[in-house]
């Protein structure tokens, strides 16, 4: 019995210390004070257009994002749909990839980056169950995202600082934890948090210095004051029955999957809610398989993007570009005349690695990377596969 008590106290002491540390570091967020919370580093959660611009003077940003691994199959779609596209100001069109590590081809990620597209994080393991993410503490998030950032930079040979955004698997937030990690490693934004309540008008990106008024469809949402990282809300679409959907492939009542015109109209109706409203960023958030396996959706999306690329006041951009604009907003005319953003180009010296044993499964892996081959398949806790 005495031994049991000693063991118990040994267990409890570090836990109590951990709790104390957490409450000391994190202050509960209080309602936002517009007078104190000013751009470029602070913005209250709100549907107000940044800079007080009129809607007609506000650039309509269009965000196309794809989640999960990048591989030879989905790269066909990315090349066909995105690469070579230009906005009406002749700057290359953007899109963002929230990449999960398993089965990703890092040589293709290097190619996406070199075409000016944004690489974001979507975790190393992307594991189930979803509750793993809901209860994830800082240490877990560090291993899944902070480690993934250096892993990505290493394996795809792209600059660490080009990786500025993340999206949680299943859009499952982890309370304060993921935002604390973003702050610690000086990343710009999170793009995991859907809103169903701030759709018309839409919620613009904001910071967490103060309490958010955004609805929390997939709790737990952050409650602490965490200055630094931005929230890029995923403004829901409305499907044909009016139900909200954060991801296009998650709509309950979408149009007939084989009806290109119905899909084109569906995309356009959702777009117009933004374009004819407060011009909050419009997202086409999807998994590539949904577009590849439904050619009518591919064609409808392609037509829609052609329209966007011909509008003088709408711009297909990388998600991080929206945050940059919100920090220091300028009118459509000024925005159009800015020089195009350019990535620092980087090379890939390709390595084909494998078969590599893995720590999480019996399966062996082959990897296509832009660096020397690892000893084992990189995974959580061993992001370089040493
Ligand atoms: Zn995913």
Image (spheres, rainbow, N blue to C red):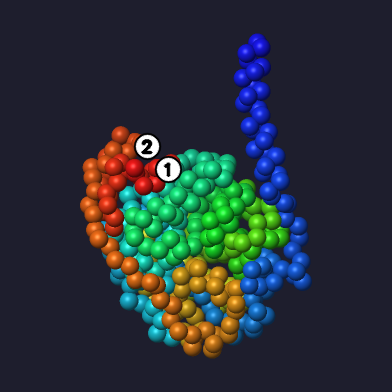
> What is the quadrant of residue 342 in the picture?
bottom left
Residue 92 shows up from this direction: yes
- SS for tag 2? loop
Q: Are marks 1 and 2 in contact (CB under 8 Å)?
A: yes
Q: Is mark 1 within 8 Å of ligand 1?
A: no
Q: Please state which of residues 324 and 268 is positioned toward the viewer in this rendering.
A: 324
Q: Residue at x 40, y 63 (%)?
A: 159
| Residue 56 position in % (x across, y down) | 59, 85
Task: Please state if 235 lies on the left or on the right of 318 as rendered.
Answer: right
Where's residue 302, x and y in %?
37, 73
Marks 1 and 2 sit apart, C-alpha to C-alpha, by 9 Å
Q: Is mark 2 within 8 Å of ligand 1?
A: no
Q: Work out whether 305 lies above or below 229.
A: below
Expressed as whole percent of the image width and height from the top left, the position of residue 353 reads: 24, 48
At horizontal 51% and vertical 47% (from top left) the residue drawn is 142
The residue at the point 65 percent across, 38 percent down is: 18
- Number of numbered tags placed on the structure image: 2
Return the residue at label 2. Answer: 360
Quadrant showing the C terminus? top left
Q: Looking at the figure, which quarter contains the N terminus?
A: top right
Q: Residues within 10 Å of mark 2 (few under 14, many from 20)?
A: few
The image shows residue 366 at horizontal and vertical percentages of 25, 47
* For residue 376, side relative to residue 234 (left or right): left
Q: Which residue is under mark 1? A: 380
Q: Residue at left 23%, top 42%? A: 355
In the image, 254 versus 107, the foreground residue is 107
């Amino acid at each position: 019995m005495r031994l049991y008590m000693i063991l118990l106290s040994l267990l409890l002491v570090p836990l109590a210390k951990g709790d104390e540390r957490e409450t000391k570091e994190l202050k509960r967020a209080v309602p936002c004070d517009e007078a104190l919370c000013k751009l470029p580093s602070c913005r209250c959660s709100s549907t107000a257009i940044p800079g007080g611009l009129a809607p007609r003077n506000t650039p309509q940003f269009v965000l196309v994002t794809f989640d999960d691994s990048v591989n030879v199959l989905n790269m066909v779609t990315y090349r066909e749909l995105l690469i070579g596209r230009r906005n009406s100001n002749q700057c290359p069109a953007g899109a963002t990839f929230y990449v999960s590590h398993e089965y990703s081809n890092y040589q293709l990620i290097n190619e996406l980056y070199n075409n000016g597209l944004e690489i974001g994080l979507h975790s190393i393991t992307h594991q189930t169950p979803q509750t793993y993410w809901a209860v994830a503490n800082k240490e877990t998030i560090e291993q899944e995202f902070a480690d993934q950032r250096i892993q990505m930079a290493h394996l795809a040979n792209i600059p660490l600082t080009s990786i500025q955004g993340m999206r949680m698997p299943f859009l499952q937030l982890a309370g304060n934890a993921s935002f604390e990690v973003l702050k610690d490693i000086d990343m710009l934004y999170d793009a995991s948090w859907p809103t169903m309540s701030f759709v018309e008008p839409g919620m613009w990106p904001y910071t967490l210095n103060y309490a958010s008024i955004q609805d929390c469809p997939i709790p737990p949402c952050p409650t602490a004051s965490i200055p630094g990282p931005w929230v890029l809300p995923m403004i829901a679409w409305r499907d044909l029955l009016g139900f909200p959907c954060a991801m296009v492939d998650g709509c309950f009542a979408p149009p007939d999957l084989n009806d290109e015109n119905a899909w084109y109209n569906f995309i356009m109706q959702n777009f117009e809610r933004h374009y004819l409203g407060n011009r909050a960023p419009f997202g086409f958030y999807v998994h590539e398989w949904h577009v590849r396996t439904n050619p009518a959706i591919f064609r409808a999306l392609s037509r829609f993007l052609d329209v966007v690329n011909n509008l003088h006041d709408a711009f297909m951009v990388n998600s991080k570009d929206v945050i940059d604009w919100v920090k220091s907003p300028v009118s459509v005319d000024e925005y159009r005349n800015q020089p195009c953003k350019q990535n620092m180009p980087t090379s890939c010296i390709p390595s084909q690695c494998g078969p590599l044993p893995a720590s999480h499964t019996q399966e062996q892996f082959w990897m296509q990377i832009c660096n020397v081959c690892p000893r084992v398949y990189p995974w959580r806790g061993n992001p370089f596969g040493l």
